[in-house]
Amino acid sequence: MGPAPRLQPMPSARPVHAGRLAGWERLAFALVFALMMAFVVVITISSARAHGQGGAGGSAGSPSSAARPRPRPAARPRAGAGAGSGSGSGGQTAGRAARAAWDHRLAVALAPVVQGRPGSLAVGVIDSSTGAAAVYGRRLRFQAASIVKPEILAALLLRARHAPAGLSNSDAGLAAQMIEASDRVAANRLWDLAGRAGGLAAADVILGLRHTTPGPGEKWGLTTTTVGDQLTLLTDLTTAKSPLSSAERAYELSLMRTVGPAQPWGVSAAAGPGGVSAIKNGWRLDGPARLWVVNSIGVVRRDGQRLLMAVLSRGQPTRAAGIAAADAAAVAAADCMTSGG
């Protein structure tokens, strides 16, 4: 055998396009690359224009404006929103501001009345046609004296609903004596029938009197109250939104319109010519200093408006001085409410 043949290494495999490209191939690649770059430039410019229109507030029909949410405009207050109108915190704030404005107006009107006078005074007035209300001395508490008697009668009327015959004729006679003549004996009897302090307290819950404390034992005159609670009671006697029926309200107001000659003072001084008053006044000596409590509540008409009014005072040197203060305060409060706001 001769010598084995020598194996030659095989040449390495090369890609098809290794080495220099033909001229036509280079031209084709250049054209493709140029077309790709032109496409990228067109897309970039279009996108930039679209974003620019959206940022500048494009038309409502453009795709950019439809895709991007717009901020909501701030809520506008309703025209004419005032005391008690509107809902939510805005309406409540407006209501508080209106009440504060009326309270300030009443305080200004009462300044000449209280200046230099002894004792303490609280006054409240509501215009029942508009609901406007003003209160002076809101937080002060006073002995009620005989102005508790309409409250006793209201409690008795609520209790009589559960009696088979309702309010008896004899009890109605006592009620007339208690309100019209401010008779103490009749008041003592009806205080017992109404359940005394416990019965009055239960009725006060129904009537909405939250700051009134019935007197102890037989001392109904020592019931303490506020001017705001007295306005609430008058509201119960004059509006349909009341725990008292229309017949009960009419009955009690009829008694308050026919009070005796010893009581035509206080809030009745604020009534206009021919104005019909439904009132109840009260007075009593208080404490070892022998100072007077003098109170007046009621409903009067003045300048075509129906006003619910309460004037409470204590520390008066004489009954006559307390009556003069009540008269002056009632007239000032009525002027404040009827002269516009």
Image (spheres, rainbow, N blue to C red):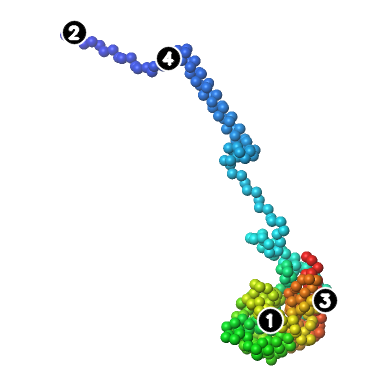
Task: Locate residue 195: give its quadrant.
Answer: bottom right
Q: Is residue 107 visible?
A: no
Q: Nearer the viewer, mark 3 or mark 2?
A: 3
Q: Which mark is residue 19?
A: 4
In the image, what residue type sits under mark 4? Answer: Gly
Q: Which residue is mark 1?
A: 251
Residue 145 in the image: above or below residue 113: below
Determine the CA span between mark 3 and mark 2. Answer: 158 Å
Disc 2, SS = loop
Disc 4, SS = loop
Determine the CA span between mark 1 and mark 3. Answer: 24 Å
In the image, what residue type sits under mark 1? Answer: Tyr
What residue is at 51 percent from the left and 18 percent from the top?
31
Q: Which residue is mark 3?
A: 273
Query: For the N terminus, which image quadrant?
Result: top left
Q: Position of residue 108 (x, y in %)?
A: 80, 69
Looking at the image, tell me whether mark 1 or mark 3 is earlier in sequence order: 1
Count of numbered circles in the view = 4
Looking at the image, tell me whether mark 3 or mark 2 is earlier in sequence order: 2
Q: Nearer the viewer, residue 59 or 104?
A: 59
Determine the CA span between mark 3 and mark 4. Answer: 123 Å
